[in-house]
Amino acid sequence: MRGTITQRSKGSWTIVLDVGRDPATGKRQQQWLTVRGTKREAEKKLAELQHQLNTGDYLKPSGGNLGDFLERWLRDYAWPNLSPETAQVYDLICRVHLIPALGTLELSKVTPEVLQGYYAKALKEGRRDGKGGLSPRTVRHHHTTLHTALGHAVKWRLLGRNPADAVDAPRFQKREMRVFDQRGMAAFLDSIKANEHYALFYLALYTGARRSEVLALRWGDVDLNLGSISINRSLHQLGDKSFVFLAPKTAKSRRLVALPPSATIVLRKHWEAQTAQGLLLGVPAAADTLVFCHPDGGPLLPHTVTNVWKRLVKQAGFEGIRLHDARHTHATLMLSQGVHPKIVQERLGHANISMTLDTYSHVLPGLQEAAALRFDQASSPALETAKVSSR
């Protein structure tokens, strides 16, 4: 027997359900419920709960609020499993917005209606300084955080369904991709030749590697003879200013990227300059030395590198092109030159080719027209043969 029924008063019954022992403490666990109605209705409820226990569909009451759950989710899932940047974004959204606004709400009381109301309020008056609402893009990030976290509440059997599934997140216009054309890229690089980050930005534009990947490169990952770099890790800075090097999240992100001859020459000159400087300072460059680093070998600050890029593109007359757009520039120029999308996918480290095509198909307006023309040309001999046969 996994449960009992006791009458509390007329028309009120208490169900005590035995839900097993706590794996950590070995103590017996019980769920107490009050059912109003007849004894038959109480017996029916007990039978339903027993069936759920027997089939594995039983959901243990969480006994906590949304704030407690989000704290646990950040600690047990987000930080151990996600990239530091992603975990930090989730952490910031939870602590600055979600927990203050919704944290005291019981987890079982988080409904689609509650979330929709939160989004509407955040759009209207969500800024911390009290000067208006948050942007639709920002509120959509809040929705993504809640949807991801509550999805784990379902997996952990704290909720029967994800309430965020039934909520309409705010729509926003995706930021337009801005890239260099061939002449613009050449002009920009020519304007920054004297800058200490010239080789870094040259490599980003000529390989399509991410900022975190470029900053994590060691000289042991570079083959100046064959002209290639091995991308096998990334550099991240945490909120406490410490640095971590992480392995790629997917197998496709770990890749060998061939260097154009000009990029190999730029890297060789950078190696010679870094080696000479290292000898003067008593810190000679070695295989595990970072390709782009401070004179003492310490990692460059990612955000500082981004700020340098912003200043340089503005000075060169290309304001608005982000450092991440160097990656987009590399991809769009290669595709426009007729390089097969599969090759571009491999150079960028995309998980699959559909991601590459979805991201960059808009820069190839003649792709479908060219395919239709090639199909027609291939079919023409067959059509001519059919015409001759019919005469």
Image (tube, rainbow, N blue to C red):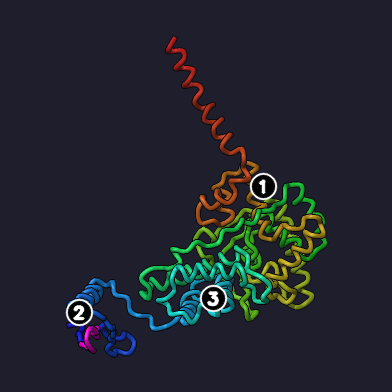
> The N terminus appears in which quarter of the rendering?
bottom left
In the displayed orientation, state which residue is furthest to the top: 391
Residue at (32% x, 75% y) in the render: 59
Could you say which disc has been placed on residue 271 in the image? none
- Dot 1 or dot 3: first in sequence order is 3
Label 3 amino acid? Leu
| In this rendering, position of residue 201 left or right of residue 250 | right
Label 1 amino acid? Leu
Q: Which residue is mark 2?
A: 38
Label 2 amino acid? Thr
Residue at (43% x, 12% y) in the render: 390
Disc 1 vs disc 3: Cβ atoms closer than 8 Å?
no
Q: Residues within 10 Å of mark 2 (few under 14, many from 20)?
A: some
Q: CA distance from mark 1 to mark 2?
A: 74 Å
Q: Is residue 190 magenta?
A: no
Q: Which residues are magenta?
A: 7-17
Could you say which disc has been placed on residue 333 in the image? 1
- Dot 1 or dot 2: first in sequence order is 2
List x then y, in percent, for residue 155: 38, 71
Position above or below: 199 against 89:
above
Q: Which residue is mark 3?
A: 98
Disc 1 vs disc 2: Cβ atoms closer than 8 Å?
no
